[in-house]
Amino acid sequence: MNLFSGFTDSDLKEVVSPLFGVNYWIGLSISVCLIASLFIFKGFYAQVSRYNVFRYSLGSLQLILYFLYFYFHEMNGDINWKDYMPFHLCSLLDLVSIFLLICPSDKLFSLTFPLVGPVVLPFLFPDKHVYGPDNFFYYHYYLNHLIIFFGFFYLYTYGHVKFNSLYLRQICTFMTGFALFVFVFNITFGTNYLFIGSAGFTFTDKYWLLSTGHWNPVFRFIFMWSVGMMFILIFNFLIKKYFPPFYFNSGSEVNKYYDNKLSLFSKIKNRLKKTNKLGA
């Protein structure tokens, strides 16, 4: 007997929630706030960064979520060997993020950081398997993607790793090779990896353009490869040009680049003062 019956149920007839409903906005809002906290409470995270326990805890939580996802699906009898393949970009980054949080590596980070950009897509376009907050898979969906995004930026902005943008060519080569391999796997086994959800983004006819599960396989590959390359190039450019880390050496050394730059709160405060003076 399943002691967690209902909470671990993956039967969509029982637990499906409306797409873009209240539960979606709650999950999205909390995720955005936690990611934003990295850029607002810099002093706090700098202090936390001097101890490894936060990294280890975050990586351990992510590892537990990774195994629980497959365990509960196996327990429900709705998974096969093809579902274990880490061929979604988020699944690949999930494993990389776990490793980096526990054992930071400059080279591995530099090779995978620009791939994080597309992780925003699951927040904007939720999987067709939408659960409510009374179900494990609801928390897994948001926590899993949140930790990937949060973990990569935490490691970078607080000096746990160094990003080398010179790896861009290797990143594009790897991503192309990976996409081609997964394309062949999709054709061979009838899967739809690299896309949102195991069967693509399957909205109703109203959203037919996003229903990637029904597209021609070659067109799906070209489209997603193009989107992926665009994200990688833009992300790499923005990080290199406009967003150096806040701290070096695990939060112990302030980046002087920000010495003369106001914090977000300071900018808002100055803007309010200026507005009040004009209104007086």
Image (tube, helix red, strand yellow):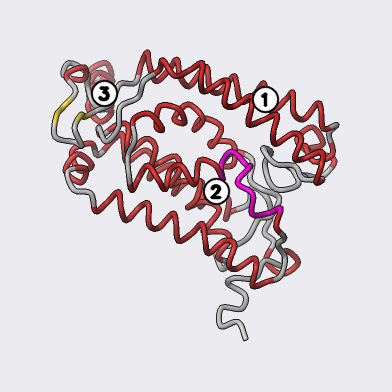
Q: Please tell me the numbered disc located at residue 225.
A: 1
Precedes in sequence: disc 3 or disc 1: 1
Three-letter code, disc 2: Trp
Residue 131 or 169: which is nearer the viewer?
Answer: 169
The crowd level at tag 2 (other Cα within 10 Å; few <14, some 14-19, many 20+) is few
Instruction: Pick whichever of labels 2 and 1 is earlier in the sequence.
Output: 2
Q: Quadrant of the C terminus?
A: top left
Amino acid type for the residue under numbered disc 1: Trp
Asked which secondary structure carries label 2, the reply is: helix
Q: Nearer the viewer, mark 3 or mark 1?
A: 1
* Helix, strand or loop at mark 3: helix
Residue 25: image tag: 2
Q: Residue at x 64, y 73 (%)?
A: 75
For mark 1, give the secondary structure: helix
> Front-most of 192 and 135?
192
For disc 3, the neighbor class at 10 Å (few under 14, some 14 to 19, many from 20) is: few
Residue 154 shown left or right of residue 277 in the figure:
right
Q: Which residues are magenta?
A: 82-91
Residue 194 shown left or right of residue 188 in the figure? left
Q: Which mark is residue 118?
A: none
Q: Is residue 185 magenta?
A: no
Locate residue 103: give its quadrant.
top left
User: Which numbered marker is on residue 267?
Assistant: 3
- What is the spatial separation of the Cα atoms under label 2 and label 1, in whole angstroms? 29 Å
Q: Position of residue 104 (x, y in %)?
A: 32, 39
> For the residues carrying marks 2 and 1, which lies nearer the camera in this image?
1
Q: Position of residue 62 (x, y in %)?
A: 44, 54
Helix, strand or loop: magenta stretch: helix
Q: Is residue 8 above or below residue 268?
A: below
- C-alpha separation, residue under disc 3 versus residue under disc 1: 38 Å
